[in-house]
Image (cartoon, grey):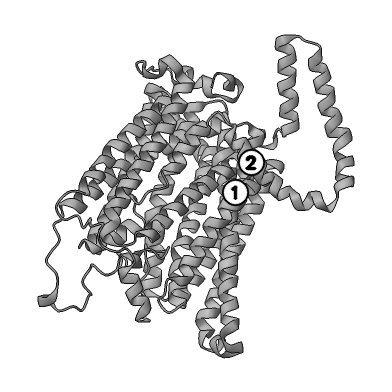
């Protein structure tokens, strides 16, 4: 009996532990993030394809949509973050969730109406009604993206910190798991909705995405409520005034000087006595100026953060063509790579990205958080050296004597539309959502070209080295990204997490916009090598900024041997110890 009770008791304990994990706040947070990310990836993939289909296979609407989205986050990132800071966690999470999903559902319904009645809409009011529908779709889709930004700031930069508590190892593991979910959904979600659109129709795709978001919104809302209930500390949120008072109390306790009390009284008087009076005097003017003041204060606060250089280092990594976006993939087409090969390369990049999340958790335990960023940066840059070498290898089309606008100007004068390039899956516009791939058109042979007239095969040494470097660099890239993410989580005061991460998103979008502008200025494949060298230079500058941050943080211990105690290394970068940074 005792022998039977032993294994039975072990099985019960295992089942209890399993049930406890699946009902824990951590797992529920993962599940909610997976559902949210899956819907986001499906929508971001599909909306660009829908816009291409609607506008007669032209990429104009897609390019306008990309510009509006990037510009909105750039201008409103700080304001969104400030709104996150000033409201309760549950209210912010639920509001952004409902706005995001409701916007996508509404957009899907409008797109279905356009697909059904496009011919009739073209004849009404000389086509202006259809144009207004396009504007409405882009506007609502932009609102959905802004709400998605608020959700990401709330969950990934605030809730996850509170759920992890004081355990930094648990925080690192949760950050890594979140990134793995992102990597998987980046590949699987577009594949799923792409198959639905291929074997069905764009209208069926719109209906499926709308239905998914309606169902997902209800489930995510329930999951958020469960996480909030299981983590009582989420209900506690310090305001800036409370944090300033706590800091002054700490100063008083440390220095035991009476004037500290006077400072405290002045602050309380300013908050309780003078501010309402000033609001009455200023009135509407203050309300109009408030967004601009918030924008200014957000960027100033970001600059004054102890991890400013680390955040800037991460933002500089967005100024690159060395990724699996429309630009690099379009270049690969001009060099003769097939869609199936590109699909395999994208899968390999996802695998190395997941390896980067595993490397982050291991390095952090062995070397500490700050040194993990240094090692990751060196690893990424070393791999990108292969990309720089590929520019000068056989098969590289580098030729700076070719006019960058020759092909485009010729097409414009001929009044011919720029054709779209097929995606790796075969559908027009897939993986080319921003409208950049057409800029590379002209070097690849047309699909119906005469085989006798087709150009000679391009040597694959250059493009092989390029993608080998890009894929291998994903390990260091994602490890570095997780390092800076956790540094921001640990260093930024609770009352400023929203606005600081909002400005960080704005910086990322700004550098991302600059890299598209760089491609517009040099769009031909012959100039792509120059873009690669510029990209590698920006990555190097980003890691130099991080090195400077690490040097200030660790001082003489920067090049010390790795320590198995990461807490001792990263203590200096906690909000309570920012004076050492």
**Furthest residue toward left:** 452
Measured as percent of width and height from the top left, residue 275 is found at 85, 38
Any part of residue 369 in sight = no
Of marks 2 and 1, which one's residue comes earlier in the chain? 1
Q: Residues within 10 Å of mark 1 (few under 14, many from 20)?
A: many
User: Which residue is located at x 55 percent, y 37 percent?
Assistant: 160
Q: Is residue 346 left or right of residue 237?
A: left
Q: How many marks?
A: 2
In the picture shown, does residue 61 fall above or below 234?
below
Measured as percent of width and height from the top left, residue 409 is found at 35, 72
| Depth check, front residue: 49 or 382 | 382
| Depth check, front residue: 570 or 451 | 451
Alpha-carbon span between mark 2 and mark 1: 9 Å
Any part of residue 387 in sight = yes
Q: Could you say which quadrant of the image residue 383 lies in?
A: top left
| Label drawn at residue 579 | none
| Depth check, front residue: 240 or 7 | 240
In the picture shown, does residue 419 fall above or below 300?
below
In the picture shown, does residue 140 fall above or below 111?
above
| Label drawn at residue 77 | 1
Locate the N terminus and report the quarter of the image it occupies. Answer: top left
Measured as percent of width and height from the top left, residue 38 is found at 47, 55
Q: Residues within 10 Å of mark 2 (few under 14, many from 20)?
A: many
Q: Could you say which quadrant of the image residue 473 lies in?
A: top left
**Furthest residue toward front:** 401
> In terms of secondary structure, where does tag 2 sit?
helix
User: Which residue is located at x 38 percent, y 68 percent?
Assistant: 429
| Circle 2 residue | 298
In the picture shown, does residue 227 fall above or below 509?
above
Measured as percent of width and height from the top left, residue 369 is found at 44, 26
Q: Is the residue under label 1 in contact with that under label 2 (CB below 8 Å)? A: yes
């Amino acid at each position: 009996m005792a022998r039977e009770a032993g294994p039975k008791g072990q099985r019960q304990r295992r089942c209890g532990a399993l049930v406890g994990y699946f009902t824990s706040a951590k797992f529920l947070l993962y599940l909610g993030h997976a559902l949210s990310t899956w819907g986001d990836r499906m929508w971001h993939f599909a909306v660009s394809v829908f816009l291409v289909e609607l506008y007669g296979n032209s990429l104009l609407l897609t390019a306008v949509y990309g510009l509006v989205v990037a510009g909105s986050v750039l201008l409103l990132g700080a304001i969104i973050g400030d709104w996150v800071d000033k409201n309760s966690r549950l209210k912010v999470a639920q509001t952004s969730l409902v706005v995001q999903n409701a916007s996508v559902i509404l957009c899907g319904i409008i797109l279905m109406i356009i697909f059904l009645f496009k011919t009739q809409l073209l004849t009404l009011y000389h086509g202006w009604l259809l144009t207004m529908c396009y504007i409405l779709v882009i506007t609502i889709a932009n609102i959905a993206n802004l709400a998605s930004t608020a959700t990401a700031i709330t969950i990934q930069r605030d809730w996850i910190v509170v759920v992890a508590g004081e355990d930094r190892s648990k925080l690192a593991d949760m950050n890594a798991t979140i990134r793995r979910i992102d990597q998987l959904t980046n590949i699987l979600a577009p594949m799923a909705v792409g198959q639905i659109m291929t074997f069905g129709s764009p209208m069926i795709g719109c209906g499926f995405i709308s239905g998914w978001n309606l169902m997902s919104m209800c489930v995510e809302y329930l999951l958020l409520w469960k996480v909030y209930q299981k983590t009582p500390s989420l209900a506690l949120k310090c305001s800036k005034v409370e944090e300033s008072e706590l800091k002054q109390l700490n100063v008083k306790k440390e220095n035991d000087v009476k004037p500290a009390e006077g400072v405290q009284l002045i602050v309380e008087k300013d908050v309780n006595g003078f501010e309402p009076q000033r609001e009455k005097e200023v009135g509407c003017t203050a309300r109009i100026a408030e967004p601009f003041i918030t924008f200014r204060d957000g960027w100033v606060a970001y600059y004054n953060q102890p991890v400013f250089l680390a955040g800037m280092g991460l933002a500089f990594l967005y100024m690159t063509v060395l990724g699996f976006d429309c630009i690099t993939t379009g270049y690969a087409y001009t060099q003769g790579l097939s869609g199936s090969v590109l699909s395999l390369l994208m899968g390999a990049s996802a695998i190395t990205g997941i390896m980067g999340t595993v490397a982050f958790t291991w390095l952090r335990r062995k070397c500490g958080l700050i040194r993990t960023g240094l090692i990751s940066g060196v690893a990424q840059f070393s791999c990108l050296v292969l990309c720089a070498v590929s520019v000068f290898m056989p098969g590289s089309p580098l030729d700076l004597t070719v006019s960058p606008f020759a092909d485009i100007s010729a097409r414009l004068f001929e009044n011919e539309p720029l054709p779209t390039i097929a995606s790796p899956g075969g559908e027009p516009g897939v993986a080319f959502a921003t409208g950049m791939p057409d800029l590379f058109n002209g070097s690849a042979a047309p699909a119906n070209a005469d085989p006798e007239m087709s150009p000679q095969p391009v040597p694959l040494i250059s493009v092989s080295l390029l993608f080998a470097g890009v894929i291998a660099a994903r390990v260091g890239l994602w490890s570095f990204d997780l390092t800076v993410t956790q540094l921001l989580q640990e260093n930024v005061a609770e009352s400023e997490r929203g606005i600081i991460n909002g400005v960080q998103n704005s910086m990322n979008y700004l550098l991302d916009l600059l890299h598209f502008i760089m491609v517009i200025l040099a769009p031909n494949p012959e100039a792509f090598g120059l873009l690669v060298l510029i990209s590698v230079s920006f990555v190097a500058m980003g890691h130099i900024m991080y090195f400077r941050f690490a040097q200030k943080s660790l001082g003489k211990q920067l090049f010390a041997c790795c320590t198995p105690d990461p807490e001792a290394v990263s203590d200096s970068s906690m909000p309570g110890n920012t004076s050492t940074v």
